[in-house]
Image (cartoon, rainbow, N blue to C red):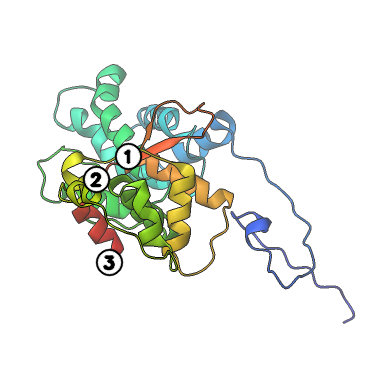
């Protein structure tokens, strides 16, 4: 037909992370703006209200949901899933006869801690929303909320697993042992009486120690088989681990030497991740 064929690809990943090393034709990139909270998201999400409740009641719930999640998650599909996932909790006071649909203050107090806990574990899609919902009901009292660190195993992205393992090694191993543990040709290290005496004390009894970002990345590079580039994806996954409370930031973020972290999970948790 002698007509040009144009291929349109939709992606949520930036082209820099997909560009092959062998070279290729550069695509024309078009960026679409995010949905606005009032002009788009509020109207779209409010259309899915259950028939047994009024549209105003569900719209008030969506307004609360967006007030919590909008600054950290603007993915429409994820917000739709979160709205369906948490609506039953929002309706609990109405179903139990403790409030009516207009008692917004009482409804907000009931669902506020539930939404904040959901934000820590779901909005970054570190685990599926269905898995988070299942974890909240396993081996717990009704209404009891549990974080990720309360479980011995959760699903994390590929590099997040290695980052968490590297963080654990950095927290519980002295800096002087890095060369011995993580370098292939480190040479012989002579053990002194002081070193032998110190090793008798379990580092697990002393608790996790803070470590800088450079040390975390150095251990990561040594335990991952393939080459890992320090891309924005790696740094965003570190931020995700902090948000999930699997890592904690020690001190202030404006330190000249960079941020310092501490691993907050147990050895059993790390064993589950390592499997």
Residue assigned mark 3: 275
Residue assigned mark 1: 245
Give the vertical position of 241 relative to 131 (above or below): above
Residue assigned mark 2: 149
Q: Position of residue 163 (x, y in %)?
A: 40, 53
Residue 230, numbered label: none
Is 25 left or right of 164, judged from the image as shown? right
Which quarter of the figure has residue 241? Answer: top left
Q: Position of residue 248 (x, y in %)?
A: 35, 36
Q: Position of residue 211 (x, y in %)?
A: 39, 41
Is 109 left or right of 215, judged from the image as shown? left
Could you say whether the residue bearing mark 3 is in a helix, strand or loop? loop
The residue depicted at 49 percent of the width and 32 percent of the height is 71
Q: Position of residue 22 (x, y in %)?
A: 72, 73
In space, the residues marked 2 and 1 are separated at their CA atoms by 7 Å
Res. 127 in view: no
Res. 204 in view: yes
Could you say whether the residue bearing mark 2 is in a helix, strand or loop? helix
Q: Nearer the viewer, residue 50 or 135?
A: 135
Could you say whether the residue bearing mark 1 is in a helix, strand or loop? loop
Mark 1 and mark 3 lie on one chain; the one further toward the N terminus is 1
Q: Nearer the viewer, residue 267 or 50?
A: 267
Whether pointer 2 and pointer 3 mark residues with C-beta atoms closer than 8 Å, the reply is: no
Whether pointer 1 and pointer 3 mark residues with C-beta atoms closer than 8 Å, the reply is: no
Label 2: few (<14), some or many (≥20) within 10 Å? some
Q: Quadrant of the C terminus?
A: bottom left
Whether pointer 2 and pointer 1 mark residues with C-beta atoms closer than 8 Å, the reply is: yes
Q: Nearer the viewer, residue 124 or 70?
A: 124
């Amino acid at each position: 037909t002698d007509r040009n064929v144009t291929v349109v690809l939709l992606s949520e990943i930036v082209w820099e992370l997909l560009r092959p090393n062998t070279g290729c034709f550069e695509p024309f990139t078009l960026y679409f703006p995010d949905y606005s909270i009032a002009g788009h998201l509020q109207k779209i999400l409010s259309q899915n209200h259950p028939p047994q409740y009024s549209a105003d009641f569900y719209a008030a719930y969506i307004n609360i949901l967006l007030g919590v999640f909008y600054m950290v998650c603007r993915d429409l599909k994820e917000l739709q899933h979160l709205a369906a996932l948490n609506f039953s909790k929002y309706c609990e006071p109405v179903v139990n006869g403790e409030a009516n649909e207009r008692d917004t203050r009482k409804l907000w107090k009931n669902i506020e801690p539930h939404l904040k806990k959901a934000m820590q574990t779901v909005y970054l899609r570190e685990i599926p929303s269905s898995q988070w919902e299942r974890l909240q009901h396993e081996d717990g009292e009704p209404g009891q909320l549990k974080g990720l660190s309360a479980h011995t195993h959760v699903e994390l992205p590929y590099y997040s697993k290695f980052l968490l393992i590297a963080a654990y090694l950095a927290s519980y191993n002295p800096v002087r042992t890095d060369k011995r543990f993580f370098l292939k040709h480190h040479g012989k290290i002579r053990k002194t009486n002081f070193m032998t005496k110190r090793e008798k004390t379990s580092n697990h009894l002393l608790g996790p120690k803070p470590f800088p970002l450079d040390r975390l990345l150095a251990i990561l590079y040594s335990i991952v088989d393939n080459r890992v580039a320090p891309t924005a994806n790696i740094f965003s996954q570190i931020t995700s681990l902090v948000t999930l409370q699997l890592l904690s930031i020690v001190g202030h973020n404006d330190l000249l030497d960079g941020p310092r972290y501490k691993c907050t999970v147990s050895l059993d948790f790390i064993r589950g991740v390592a499997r």
